[in-house]
Amino acid sequence: MVMDGIYYAAAFASGGAVIWYFAGPVFSIPMFLLGAFCLYFFRDPERSIPEGPVVVSPADGKVMGVIPDGSGASRISIFLNIFDVHVNRAPIAGSITKVEYTKGQFLVASKEAASSQNERNTVSIAGDGTCVAFAQIAGLIARRIVFNKNTGDTVGKGERVGLIKFGSRVDIFLGPEWEIAIKTGDRVAGGSSIVARRRDS
């Protein structure tokens, strides 16, 4: 459980208790339901991390597209709805070489334009002779991107690195040395689903 969920749930429960006292139990139900939803939303299950030269998904969600750029590189876009786990994980093991925050809009995260126009935090990780980048992208409802690491930090594959609150999007940027292992429409789990394999492995 992410601590934010406990804080939100406690706040809604306190509000519900106040409403119960002054207006009765029926009117307090929405507040208690919102508190329960926060506990569900901020869940943080353990995941089995695959071994070997693979890229794991940095987020839970649905693959919205696998877009080649013409040079052999690809971008994979994953949409997270409000029912998905929103904890983000490192796609490979290595050192964080760059963290770049970009201000932007808050378009619906399932739209393709969100990749280039929405507020986002782009992280590059270098390790084992390769570099993989991913972007945490805010959405219409998600307006709080959390990233818990800094440039120069070393991370393990599948390690928790942050989260995006409520509906959002995560893009992964892969070089030509990676063979894509998923397709549009697939559902992936952060830290455990393999999205690409190293071609020279």
Image (spheres, rainbow, N blue to C red):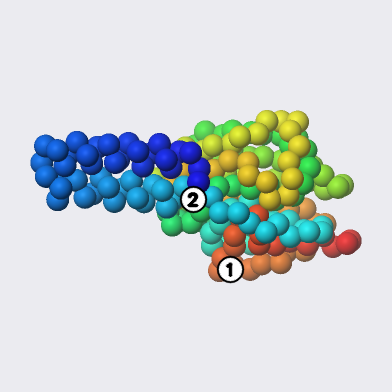
Residue 179 placement, left or right of 108: right
At mark 2, the secondary structure is loop
Q: Residues within 10 Å of mark 1 (few under 14, many from 20)?
A: few
Q: Residue 3 location, x and y as percent?
A: 48, 39
Q: Earlier in the sequence, mark 2 or mark 1?
A: 2
Please tell me in which quadrant of the rendered image residue 143 appears. top left
Residue that badge 2 annotates? 43
The residue depicted at 43 percent of the width and 57 percent of the height is 83
The residue depicted at 32 percent of the width and 36 percent of the height is 11
**Relative depth, front residue between 187 and 156:** 156
Q: Residue 75 location, x and y as percent?
A: 66, 55
Q: Residue 63 location, x and y as percent?
A: 57, 62
Point out which mark residue 186 bears. Answer: 1
Q: Amino acid at mark 1?
A: Asp
**Relative depth, front residue between 70 and 197:** 197
Q: Is residue 51 above or below residue 184?
A: above
At mark 1, the secondary structure is loop
Residue 25 visible, this angle: yes
Residue 77 visible, this angle: no
Q: Is residue 164 above or below residue 190?
A: above
Q: Residue 12 location, x and y as percent?
A: 30, 40
Discs 2/1, front: 2
* Spatial separation of the CA atoms under disc 2 and disc 1: 22 Å
Q: Amino acid at mark 2?
A: Arg
